[in-house]
Structure formats: structure tokens, C-alpha cells
Amino acid sequence: MDRAAGEITQLLHAWSAGDRAVEERLFSLVLPDLRNLARALMRRERRDHTLEPSALLNEAYVRLLAGRERDWEGRRHFFAVAARIMRRLLIDHARARTKSEMVPIDGTRDFLRGPGGQLELAIAVDTLLDELQASHPDWCSIVEMKYFMGLTDDETAEVLGLRLRTMQRQFSDARRWLFEKLNPSSCETKANATNAS
């Protein structure tokens, strides 16, 4: 663990214990990574998105401040929570926009198959990540670091304090779990074909 990561962990512990004097130093250290996280998340959104990375970062900052008394385990936990907050903000923003733009019209069953289908997938993935967090928090952190933060395998392993091969194996397991949850009929068909052989 590098020196800044160790300092961030110490500052988080002091901050959660109620030491408000460390807040400025803590956020000066984490702000560049939070900015990168907001940019990475926004790069995955549509080009005409109405939310700017700075607005996403500001809202996440407010929510992180509100959770200052949380029992922060360290830098890894902090960034996992920040990624989760930003992910939920984007989902909430998309839900609100979709509700205001859609007008129900009789006889339009396939109306939501376009961009709305992507929103449905994003909401499904968001729900599954909450489930994954409850059953396999390490897998959830890896998915958030790699998918939402855009970290490489090496960066993810370093941030999470895992050996590279261990992180890659867990990421593979997490992807398989998510695929099976999103495509249960496909997995059932494959299992039946294997059993018939």
C-alpha cells in the first residue's frame, strides 16, 4: 500500500470518529480519484446526458459527507461506497428523466424496447449488484472498480489488496453470477443440455 493510501485510511478512521479537522486533508487526497470515477461513469452514459460529471461528483460529495460517521474500513471501502453512490445517482437520474419523457399510448407494447431497454438493464444490474453486495461483497467491489471506475486488472488488484490472479478469478466468478442472474433461461437450457449428454 502506498503512503497516500495509508494516510487516507488513517484520515477516514479519524473522520468517522468525529474529527472534522481532517476533512479538508482527506478530500484533497481523494478528490482526484473521485473526479476520475465521475468521468469514467459519465463516459459510459449517452452523449446528450443532462448530468455533468461535476454535478455527479458534487452530489456524491454531499452524500459522502452525510455518511461521515460510517465505520470506514479504509480507502478501498471508501471508493467502493463512492462508486455505489454515483451509480445509484445515475440510475435515479435516468428513472426520473424517463418518467417525465414517456407518455403512455394505447397499442404501443414495444415502445420501451429502444433506449428504455437499456435503462431496464441498468436498473436490473443495479438491483443485482445490491444482491451481490449482500452475498459476495468482494465480488461486488471488483465489479464496481472495474466496470464503474474503469480500473485495469492491476489497478483493481492493488486498490483491493488482492493478488492479481485472485482478483481475476473472483471477477470471472462475479461475471458468471451476474450473467446467470440476468439470463436464467439461457443457463437452464445449457444445464439441461449438459445433463442430457
Image: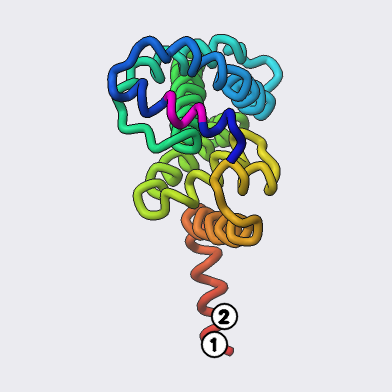
Whole-angstrom CA distance, mark 2 to mark 1, is 5 Å
User: In which quadrant is the N terminus drawn?
Assistant: top right
Q: Give the tally of numbered discs.
A: 2
Task: Specify start and end residues of the magenta stretch as a single range.
Answer: 7-11
**Is residue 50 something that shows in the picture?**
no
CB under 8 Å between callouts 2 and 1? yes
User: As displayed, is residue 28 above or below residue 190?
Assistant: above
**Is residue 7 something that shows in the picture?**
yes
Query: Mark 2 highlights which residue?
Result: 193
Q: Main secondary structure of the magenta part?
A: helix
> How did the renderer colour the structure?
rainbow
Locate residue 12 relative to residue 38 in the image: left or right.
left
Instruction: Kindly indicate the quadrant of the structure image that contains residue 49.
Output: top right
Query: Mark 1 highlights which residue?
Result: 196
User: As displayed, is residue 67 above or below residue 112?
Assistant: above
Pointer 2: residues within 10 angstroms few (<14), some, or many (20+)? few
**Please, which residue is most extreme toward the bottom here?**
197
Of 38 and 24, the residue lying toward us: 24
The residue shown at (42%, 49%) is: 137
Residue 164: x %, y % from top left: 65, 56
Instruction: Kindly indicate the quadrant of the structure image that contains residue 111.
Output: top right
Locate residue 64 relative to residue 119 in the image: left or right.
left
Of 91 and 42, the residue lying toward us: 42
User: As displayed, is residue 25 above or below residue 180?
Assistant: above
